[in-house]
Image: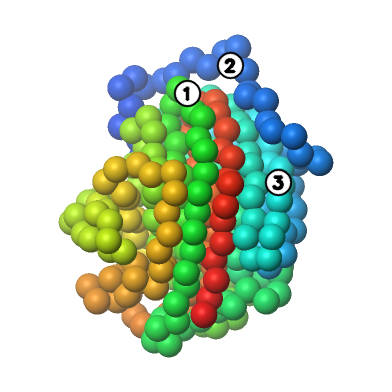
Amino acid sequence: MQFVRKSFARRCRVGLATAALALVGVTVPATPAQAASACNNGGLYDMGKYWITNNLWGAGSGSGRQCIWTTSQSGNTISWGTSYSWSGSGSSVKSYDAAILGWHWGWRRSGTGLPVQLSANRSVSTGYSYNVRHSGGAMNVSYDMWLHPMANPGSGTTPSDEVMIWTYRAGGAGPAGTRQATVTVAGTNWDLYRGRIGGSTGWNVYSFVRTSNTTSATFDIRDFLNHLVGRGWMSSSKYLTSVQAGTEIFTGTGQLDVTNFYANVS
């Protein structure tokens, strides 16, 4: 099983005021009390139907470190955190530490409710609350969903589509592709981007970027997927295989404390 993303030239671009950021001597913020932390690439913790992983897939574009830890679990709701310090290319993502429900280049946990075909119109209710501390460089807090044309993709199967929902961003971080429109989904305004990763052997990527930052969001992921189906950009025959929620770091130092996360398939 592969715990880190494939090394395609990945999705994001950054409009930074300067071409490079000097982060020498930056101190990683102290993490809250926790039993243990994992700082190695691919380090992970199982938390009920979820697992969280230290996914440093883009670390080769810079230098630094990042750690994850678990905080608590109550039923299908978890809390966890990550601290980081990254320098290097300001236009390349270094990591996407996230809580994962379902597929991530393979299956790990049972009882996820996934996969689910879009045509079934099943509710995927979710909530995500967090505290952010970040200085220097760019980052986002986001959901990341993977879709496939088949119900049970294997560990080596490339997804056909990726859907991101950015609820928070800093330092000029921006998604792949080009902005298509500003849309209202789940009662909130989003800038909608469309692009593609990896050319003919890659996948489509659609990003909903909230027009104003928030540190707490609740919605039904089905509404975002139905919006793309309604535009004719995605077939309702596709299967949602994964829901992830975490933070993408380009450069900078900081900490994300997730106080509440859940994702439930009806």
- Residue 114: assigned label: none
Q: Residue furthest right?
A: 35
Q: Label 1: few (<14), some or many (≥20) within 10 Å? A: some
| Residue located at (36% from left, 22% from top) | 19
> Which mark sits nearer the N-terminus, 2 or 1?
2
Q: Which image quadrant for residue 186?
A: bottom left
The residue at the point 61 percent across, 69 percent down is 102
Residue farthest along the top direction in this orientation: 25
Q: Are marks 3 and 2 in contact (CB under 8 Å)?
A: no
In this rendering, is residue 132 above or below 26? below
In the displayed structure, 246 sits above or below 230; it is above
Disc 1 on helix, strand or loop?
A: strand
Badge number at residue 26: 2
Q: Quadrant of the N terminus?
A: bottom right
Q: Are the two marked residues, 2 and 1, in contact with CB atoms closer than 8 angstroms?
A: yes
For label 1, the residue is 135
